[in-house]
Image: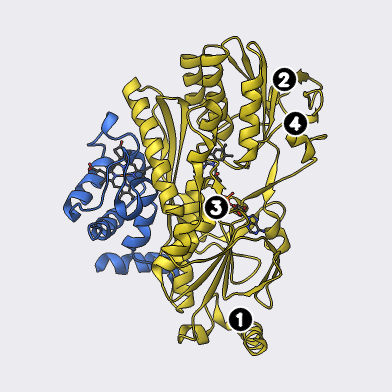
Chain colours: A blue, B yellow
Amino acid sequence: MTRLILAAAAVLASGMVPAQAQQADGRVLAMSCLNCHGPGGKSGGDIPSIAGKSEDFLKNALVDFREGKRTGNSATVMGRLAKGYSDDEIAAVAKYIATLK
Amino acid sequence: MTRISRREFAAGAAGAAALAGFAPAALAQGRARPRVVVVGGGFGGATTAKYLRMLDKNIQVTLVEPSQTFYTCPFSNLVLGGLRTLPSIAHNYTAMRNKYGVNVLHTTATKVDAAKKTVALANGQTLQYDKLVLSPGIDFKWGAIAGYDEPASQLLPHAWKAGPQTALLRRQLEAMRDGGTVVIAAPADPFRCPPGPYERVSMIAHYLKTKKPKSKILILDAKDAFSKQGLFMGGWKALYGDMIEWVPLSKDGKVVKVDAKTRQLECELGAKHKGDVVNVIPPQKAGAIAMAAGVAQGDWCPINPATFESTMRKDIHVIGDASIAAPMPKSGFSASSQGKVTAAAIVAMLQGKEPAAASFANTCYSLVGPDYGISVAAVYKVQDGKMIAVPNSGGVSPAQADPAFRKAEARYGESWYKANTAEVWG
Ligand SMILES: Cc1cc2nc3c(=O)[nH]c(=O)nc-3n(C[C@H](O)[C@H](O)[C@H](O)COP(=O)(O)OP(=O)(O)OC[C@H]3O[C@@H](n4cnc5c(N)ncnc54)[C@H](O)[C@@H]3O)c2cc1C
């Protein structure tokens, strides 16, 4: 909550329209994941499926990719992509994807 | 009919200032069912049509696309290399109709009236819209290279729209003698698929190495640097020795004139080259309907990246190759990612709500050899009204990697193709 208020204050101070202080939307964040992980998170190819995984598994995996704890041949592209998401965004996207069965 | 358009016209004229980019109140209060027309059934348009219906069944979506069959440019280079067949990269609109309830019209959009909010079609119909999405892809700037017009492309194929042109270039490669030279003229930025010409060189090299090993490939380039350059060049050296020669802009690589009959090319400073097979990738611009709709500024279409609404015409969204979305590249992945965000934004706007924060991604996989894949990836968002790549995210595959890594990326590229085309047409 404090974080949200601080973010809003920063936004106002920088003169941006408040429209930019939007909350991370799990569904919108997840949409581009499916271009690789497949419709509904079911891949059907060599890229692993992400449907049917728990919120914790997804969150931890994304953080591990981002922090370089998964490397080499087991992180060909996810390390580069996971660096594009904040903690809040990772939490939101993991929460949404965990609803895909 | 007349009553509806008059009311909409009035709302548009009177409300323009007050509405601040959001839907008329009549729509927010649930007036009948909002109508969205999508022009272009490629990566951007088909994704948008499908996602609109997935996100809100109340919206009536009409997709206008002349072709019954869509051949993807992605993996068309593999057809040239002999790793894929043309039917294996064909997609259709059956799921769009039957699974998602999109009204698909196989015809061409010819005119847009932004004030009346109508689209005229080549089949004589006129469609009324609340929101219009244009994803027409590219058109070629015929004549920008002297002598390269549409008839010339029957002799020197561009193969930059997949289908018959891909088949033609493949036939020419098959007919070429061993020891021949393939010349590829690559355009300056910006153009559709920045790594595309170099993946094409790789796939043609693979074909020649296996079938016609004495042959050469000459790239005449209108620029001095290209996408994933270090990775491509490293891969070429490893797999194809010195079969491939690259002539950059600064070494007189820019082709300014061609003679289609003799297959001769002339560069800016006077160098002349002749090929046994010549592939000219001409300079490009947004598809003609974008110009007709008045949403282009020069060759491409300026948009608000949060919603991909045109900055020139309200309630017209332009996505994919036709839009100015840099630093996002003009790719099928980008177009699809933009289509999804646009669909979500349109659903929100039609309900009088504020769109959620936009988030995009792109990854372009390229095949250097059958088991040698490389990629460039990034995540994008909107900051201060501008599209940005999220700092410190993305980048290209490592310069040093073992064969297993390259092989894994080759297989992931295949997996991407399957997933992405299923997201668009499945
Ligand atoms: C050789 C090559 C390789 C590529 N490889 C990759 C890759 O590996 N990965 C990747 O992500 N991208 C790749 N691309 C890029 C990709 O093909 C394009 O970026 C993508 O197609 C853009 O999508 P779009 O929706 O803007 O246009 P398109 O997919 O071209 O769709 C436009 C559609 O609009 C229709 N249309 C045009 N005008 C009208 C009109 N007036 N009325 C009705 N319909 C109309 C056209 O018929 C067409 O079907 C490659 C491109 C090439 C040339």
Q: Which residue in the protein does label 3 denote? A: B42
Q: Is residue B202 left or right of residue A20?
A: right
What amino acid type should be assigned to the residue bearing mark 3? Gly
Residue B242 in view? yes
Distance Cα–Cα, label 3 vs label 4: 26 Å
Q: Earlier in the sequence, mark 1 or mark 4?
A: 1
Provide the secondary structure element on which disc 3 rests: loop
* Residue matched to label 4: B155
Q: How many marks on residues? A: 4
Q: Which mark is residue B17?
A: 1
Question: Mark 4, chain letter?
Answer: B
Q: Residue at x 65, y 75 (%)?
A: B117
Name the spot of residue B313 as percent of width and height, x first.
65, 69
* Quarter occupied by residue B179: top right
Answer yes or no: is residue A21 visible.
no
Query: Residue, x 60% and y 53% (percent of image)?
Result: B67
The amino acid sitting under disc 1 is Ala
Q: Secondary structure at mark 2?
A: loop
Q: Is residue B144 left or right of residue B164?
A: right
Residue on which disc 2 sits: B275
The mark that comes first in sequence, 2 or 1, is: 1
The reply to whether label 3 and label 2 mark residues of one chain is: yes
Is the CB–ligand 1 distance for label 3 below 8 Å?
Answer: yes
- Of labels 1 and 4, the one closer to you: 4
Quick one: SS at disc 4? Answer: loop
Secondary structure of the residue carrying numbered label 1: helix
Q: Chain of mark 1?
A: B
Question: Marks 2/1: CA distance?
Answer: 58 Å
Residue found at x 25% / y 52%: A51
